[in-house]
Image (spheres, grey):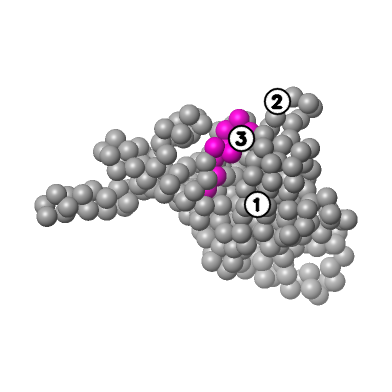
Amino acid sequence: MFRIENLTFAYNAGRRALDGVSLEIRPGEWWAVLGANGSGKSTLARHLNGLLLPQEGRVYVAGREVREYDDMRELRRLVGLVFQNPDNQIVGNSVEEDVAFGLENLGVPREEMRRRITEVLGEVGLAGWEQADPAVLSGGQKQRLAIAGALAMRPQALILDEATAMLDPAGAAEVLRLLAELHRQGLTIVMITHNMSEVTAADKAAVLAGGRLEFCGTPQEVFGAGELLRRCHLELPPAAALGEMLGLPGCMDLDALLAALTALKDGETA
C-alpha cells in the first residue's frame, strides 16, 4: 500500500523533520508509528496522502509515486487522513452534511451520496444522528464522525494522526474499537501516536526519533526494546516496565505479564 524510500524533508531549510526514512506497509496491515513530539511522525503522515511532497527520496501509494498522480484528489480518495482535533475537521451544520461535504466536492450523484452516508454512519455507530448538530456530540463521537467523512470516500487506507490524543479514555476506546473492526474488514490503517498502550492492536510498529527511523518490528518486539524506547523519549506502560525489571521483556499488558510469570513459575516447578 505504501513504499517509502529514503524520504527526507525539512521545513524552511531548517533541521530535517524526516531524514532518510524507508518503510513498506502492505495492504490490510495496521501499523503504529511511534515517536515523541518533534520526532517527524506527523510529517510522515502528511507524505502518505500528498499533503507534503518529498524533497529527497520517493513515496509510493498503491504502486504509484505520489508525483505521478495528476490530480491529488485521486490520491486523497485512496488515503483518508484524520487529525488530532475533531473540532477542526467538522464543517457541516449537521452530521449528515459533514459526511456529505467531501462527496459533494467530488460530484458524487445524490442517490449514491445518500447511500454512502447511511452506510458509513452505520459503520461508525452514528446511525440515527443524521440531523444532529455536531456540537452536541462527545469527543469520541466527533472523531468517529471525522472517520465517517474519510470512509465515505471509499479509501484503501486510513491515516490517523494522534486521533485519540484529545479524547478522554472512553472516547479513545470508542475510536480504537472502530479501528479494530475496520482492520478486520481489510482496511489498511496507519496510526500515528506517542501512546504506547495503543500499539498493542497493531500488526507492526515503527519508532521515529529526530526524523530517523530507529526501529521496526512487531508490537511485542517494540515493547521488548525498553532501552531504545527510553532513548527515544518514550515510556513503557507499567506492565511492560515491570516485566522488564523481572527479566521478562516484551509483555504488552498485564495479561501477558501474568502469563509470562505463570510460565516461569511452572518451568521452575518442573
Which residue is disc 3 drawn over?
212
Instruction: Give the numbered dot on residue 90.
Output: none
Label 1: few (<14), some (14–19) or many (≥20) C-alpha neighbours in 10 Å: many
Q: Secondary structure at mark 3?
A: strand
Position in image of residue 174 (x %, y %): 52, 55
- Residue 253's place in the image compared with 114, above or below, is above
Position in image of residue 262 (x %, y %): 21, 52
Q: CA distance from mark 3 to mark 1?
A: 20 Å
Viewer can see residue 158: yes
For the residue pair 136 and 207, the one nearer the viewer reads as 207
Viewer can see residue 167: no
Going by the numbered disc 3, the residue's amino acid type is Arg
For the residue pair 11 and 81, the one nearer the viewer reads as 11
Position in image of residue 107 (x %, y %): 87, 65
Q: Main secondary structure of the magenta part?
A: strand
Of the two numbered discs 1 and 2 on the same chain, state the one appearing first in sequence. 2
Which residue is disc 2 drawn over?
15
Which residue is disc 1 drawn over?
159
Label 2: few (<14), some (14–19) or many (≥20) C-alpha neighbours in 10 Å: few
Q: CA distance from mark 1 to mark 2?
A: 25 Å
**Going by the image, does 55 lie left or right of 266?**
right
Going by the numbered disc 2, the residue's amino acid type is Arg
Label 3: few (<14), some (14–19) or many (≥20) C-alpha neighbours in 10 Å: many
